[in-house]
Image: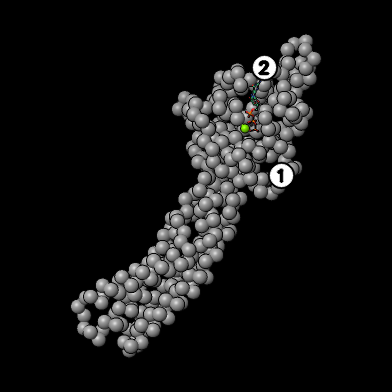
């Protein structure tokens, strides 16, 4: 999300006061009855400074997207990362400052006109003092918006028209290897709350259908009971995005997790996600899955628990076509209806 550059209170004031001075200089060098000039100069200084400061505040508010208008995924993302309430509160404070400065601008230009010319400069300085104190009052809010800007800079770019497939499975089962095999280009990497490695998004085009595959290292790769609230929220954001989950087993167990363990994770994922789950068994090349072998019956038991899972080897590029064919049958979930 793009939040415009946020000034500090001093930067905000400096610019306004500088422009006020410039505008006053123009009045000073203009032709005007001598006795009117002092009042006119100070009024212009107040009005210009207030206008410049107000414009900046308004620009920040206008250019910051309205959270409610964004897709739910981004709303969740913003909420997890910086907090929607805090973001709204800060923007509200800017709006409040805008209102107060408008009032000061009106009050003081009226006063400068009504009072004798020798009072003009003093009134202007009073107005500036009050504007400065308004700017100081929103200091924390400007700070927060600047923090939010930096936090939201590298938000993932999601294509909401594409069919989205989210990868799940324990660490080291071959998620990244598979993502790279499935997509032509290197996956894009973006921030994702509380996953140190960030989110990875790969794109595929199949028969004019756009498919994006999303890997979230550190999130859908461990028991859900271990997750904190924030991670749970991050998962809910994914749930809103996923048209299908691609759950990866490591049939060889070289990832360090037994098939029982992996199956338990699958069961949890099934509970959380309403989207269809595509199950595949990876590393078939080193799994020892050959008829008559010791491991055959053991692995076969887990394969049979799942309805026709795909058996592949991501590193060998074995079975990639079968996965793509399954992707072709994934339907985009329509989340735009009112019931949702
Ligand atoms: N033999 C074999 N090795 C594989 C296969 N797929 C992945 N690997 C290896 O398994 C290891 C882990 O693969 P990754 O793709 O990094 O696994 P990951 O699930 O992305 O791991 P994390 O990002 O840490 O969760 C790497 O050394 C891969 O080369 C496969 O089909 N066969
Ligand atoms: Mg990985």
Which residue lies at the image location 57% right of the left edge and 29% below the top edge?
179
| Spatial CA span between label 2 and label 1 | 33 Å
Earlier in the chain: of badge 2 and badge 1, it is 1
Ligand 2, image quadrant it occupies: top right
* Local SS, label 2: helix
Residue 102, x across and y down, in percent: 41, 72
Please name the residue that numbered disc 1 is placed on. Answer: 227
- Residue lying at the far top in this picture: please name it: 292
Query: Depth check: 12 or 156 in front?
Result: 12
Cβ(mark 2) to ligand 1 < 8 Å? Answer: yes
Quadrant of the image for the C terminus? top right
Which residue lies at the image location 21% right of the left edge and 80% below the top edge?
32
Which residue lies at the image location 56% right of the left edge and 24% below the top edge?
181
Please name the residue that numbered disc 2 is placed on. Answer: 285
Q: Is residue 29 left or right of residue 116?
A: left
- Residue 273 seen in the current view: no
Q: Is residue 52 left or right of residue 133?
A: left
* Local SS, label 1: loop
- Badge 1 crowding class, 10 Å Cα cut-off, few under 14, some 14 to 19, many 20 or more, is some
Query: Depth check: 213 or 32 in front?
Result: 32
Which residue lies at the image location 44% right of the left edge and 74% below the top edge?
131
Q: Place residue 48 in its image quadrant.
A: bottom left
Residue 167, x across and y down, in percent: 62, 32
């Amino acid at each position: 999300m793009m939040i415009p550059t946020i000034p500090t209170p001093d930067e905000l004031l400096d610019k306004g006061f500088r422009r006020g001075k410039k505008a006053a200089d123009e009045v000073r060098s203009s032709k005007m009855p001598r006795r009117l000039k002092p009042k006119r100069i100070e009024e212009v200084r107040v009005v210009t400074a207030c206008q410049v400061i107000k414009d900046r505040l308004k620009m920040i508010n206008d250019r910051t997207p309205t959270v409610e208008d964004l897709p739910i995924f981004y709303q969740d993302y913003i909420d997890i990362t910086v907090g929607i309430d805090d973001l709204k509160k800060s923007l509200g404070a800017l709006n409040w400052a805008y209102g107060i400065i408008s009032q000061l601008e009106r009050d003081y230009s009226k006063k400068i006109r009504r009072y004798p010319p020798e009072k003009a400069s003093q009134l202007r300085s009073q107005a500036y003092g009050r504007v400065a104190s308004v700017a100081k009052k929103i200091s924390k809010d400007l700070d927060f918006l600047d923090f939010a800007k930096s936090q939201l800079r590298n938000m993932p770019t999601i294509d909401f028209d594409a069919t989205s497939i989210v990868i799940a499975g324990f660490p080291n089962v071959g998620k990244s290897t598979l993502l790279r095999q499935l997509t032509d280009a290197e996956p894009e990497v973006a921030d994702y709350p509380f996953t140190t490695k960030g989110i990875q998004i790969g794109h595929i085009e199949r028969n004019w259908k756009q498919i994006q595959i999303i890997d979230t290292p550190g999130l859908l790769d461990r028991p859900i009971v271990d997750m904190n609230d924030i991670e749970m929220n991050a998962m809910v954001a994914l749930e809103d995005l996923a048209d299908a989950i691609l759950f990866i087993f490591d049939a060889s167990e070289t990832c360090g997790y037994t098939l029982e363990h992996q199956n338990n994770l699958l069961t949890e994922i099934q509970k959380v996600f309403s989207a269809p789950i595509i199950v595949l068994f990876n590393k078939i090349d080193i799994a020892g899955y050959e008829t008559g072998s010791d491991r055959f019956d053991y692995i076969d038991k887990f394969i049979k628990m799942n309805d026709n899972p795909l058996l592949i080897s991501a590193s060998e590029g074995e079975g990639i076509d079968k996965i793509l064919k399954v992707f072709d049958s994934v339907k985009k979930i329509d989340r735009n209806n009112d019931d949702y």
